[in-house]
Amino acid sequence: MKNFFFKIYMLAFMVLVVFFMVIIWKVTFAHILHEYHERHKSQEIAKFKEEQEQKVEKTKFEKVILESEERVKHYLGYRILEEVRIKGHFHHIGFDIGPDKRSYCIKCHGDMPHDAVKELRAFLNMHAFFVACETCHIKLEGPQKTGVFKWYDRTTGEIVASPVKKGSPGSFKAKIIPFEKHNGAIQRVDSDDKISFALEYRENERKLSEAQKSKAKKLIHKIVNKQPYLCEDCHQKERPLLPLEDIGYPKERIDSIISTEVVGMIKNYTKFYMPKMLQPGEEAKKQ
Amino acid sequence: MILTRAQKIFPVIFLSLLIFISYPLQTSSLAADIGNCLLCHKYPGLSRIDEEGQMRLFFINESIFNNSVHAKVKCEGCHTDITEIPHKPAIKVDCLVECHIVEPSTETKFSHKDVASFIKTSVHGKVDSAGNEKKFVQDYPDCKDCHDNPLYRPLSFFKKVRPGISEASLGRCRVCHKKDDFIYQFYNHVTTRLHKSRNPLNIAEMCARCHDDSALVARHGLSTKAVFSYGETFHGKAATFLDERVPDCLDCHVNKGESVHQMLSHKDPLSSIHEKNKGKVCATIDCHPSASPKLANYGVHSEFNLNQSPAQYFFTFFFIVLTGGTLLPLMGIIFLDLVRRFFPHATIGRRK
């Protein structure tokens, strides 16, 4: 037993010695090597030989804001404001909301998916921040329809209590998802089976033939309607699509959502920009 | 109980008066949003991808905006092309535009035009003295490269100097001034201007975005990664601990009493860091008043770099080799000794 503990002690000591050797290497000879390489790199840049073109990737809200590593702390003396920094952005952002880990739609379509209708795309993306894609793009009819909508946590994906009363408008850590009737039971439309199928397709996409890809895409999008719900379907007094009271909206917020101010704005926008409001994306397709 | 006519009218008059009094208070706190822009722009997700594939975020955080120096400027004061709702995609804001605020000393409309003229003649200007565009002009800063919406950093001086607002001082303001909104704005504006509007660390971080960019430093033939080398000094270390008293970049590189936008090259005889002037930099009344001009002669931006500071380089090199050359073999011997203790009977090959 004594021998065993002696061996453990020796082993720990050896690890410690190696650890110190690495540190000493880093602050001494590695430092010299680093300086040498940096100096040569600078000289090359100065000669303009090292102009590398960076591949421009499609920007994602998630990458730029929600998971951005470029953060800044404003030391105001009486408080510290920490936020994400976007290069060239003047106004402060000041909110911290994690990315939507549950949605399988955004894995392919991105988290700012609306760009077909130029004048409305920002509004639609704004709603996509707290409304799941399925809420507008799936029209449940007949026995499938439940009229039940709930909130799910963006990070864990679990159904949570309504965050509306706690958060400021539109900046919730949750999203609204519809529920459907399946084999007599009520379940969320983004079921685990659907998610795993879509994710499996994404992983194996390269290996599939065109016919297989087409078939898989059809299956994934089977429940998606070509004609999504429109602004007026929720922003109306009579029979709004979303049961606002049931999903936790207080009366004053409901009044605001269906107010003349908002509804009038929608009408103005659709009248001003969208004479063909019922065919979103049609003009883009023609082009 | 029978009420007289006066008693019946009194509640109506009282309520009317209450509404009349409270109405300006309600609207004044949202003075900048007269156009009700926040109806849409209060939503964090209001965003889209622009034609260049870059994200555009249109969200305005109201509570932070109301604590900024632009809190009293109406949205359309800067976004001048937006005159109606619905509006078309807004054009880029021109920071030199005349906004609706009147500058009280001259009673003219406020504008940042002077800043543009300062920048033009400074080291950060995009044209040289002959009026020609400088090389690598895209590297020179625009307003938003250094500035986001500046936030208030109020100070209290009532009993002692500390960050924040003094409620006791506000009480004195209220004796003469009746609108709290005005009092807060004025207090914040004045006390923020009585000290650095940004913490030294924030200033250094801002400058570092360009001046620590290896490629930019190399392109412009600058002698140092300025903020990195500042960070190696005592001042830089103290700045990282949020000390507000230590000098940041602007304290040395701008002549006292001038705008920070009037920064000049060290080769310019009018520059605060010109060879003939830099002796005075340290000896200001706020820093080291009795310091000799020689104090400023040390290598503020020396780096461990053979090209930039050969003497410091070889001096440091010697000590690095001495340290590494002593400790690494020592550690190696200790390690081998431990291996022997761990495997006391192990041999390589046949024991003779």
Image (cartoon, coloured by chain):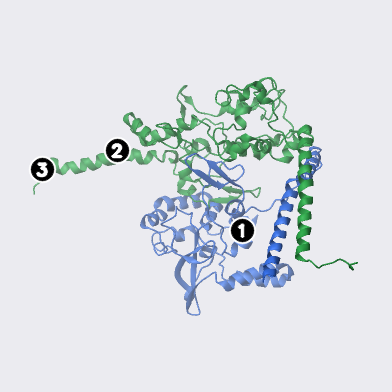
Chain colours: A blue, B green
Q: Residue furthest right?
A: B352
Horizontal relation, residue A94 to residue B347: left or right: left
What's the amino acid at mark 3? Thr
Is there one chain holding both mark 1 and mark 3? no
Q: Is residue A145 above or below residue A128?
A: below
Is the residue marked by circle 1 packed among few (<14), some (14-19), or many (20+) residues within 10 Å?
A: some
Please name the residue that numbered disc 1 is placed on. A110
Residue occupied by mark 3: B4
> Callout 2: residue from which chain?
B
Question: What is the crowding at mark 3: few (fewer than 14 residues within 10 Å), some, or many (at least 20)?
Answer: few
Distance from Cα at disc 1 to Cα at disc 3? 70 Å
Looking at the rendered structure, the secondary structure element under dot 1 is loop
For numbered disc 3, what is the local secondary structure? loop
Q: Chain of mark 1?
A: A
The percent coordinates of residue B249 (x first, y second) are 62, 32
- The amino acid pointed to by label 2 is Ile
Question: Which labelled disc corresponds to residue A81?
Answer: none
**Which quadrant of the rendered structure holds the C terminus of chain B?**
bottom right
- Residue named by callout 2: B21
Q: Position of residue B15 (x, y in %)?
A: 24, 43
Which residue type does callout 1 highlight? Gly
Q: Visible in this render: residue A286? A: yes
In the rendered image, which quarter is residue B332 located in? bottom right
Q: Residue drawn at (70%, 57%), measured in percent from left and top?
A: A16
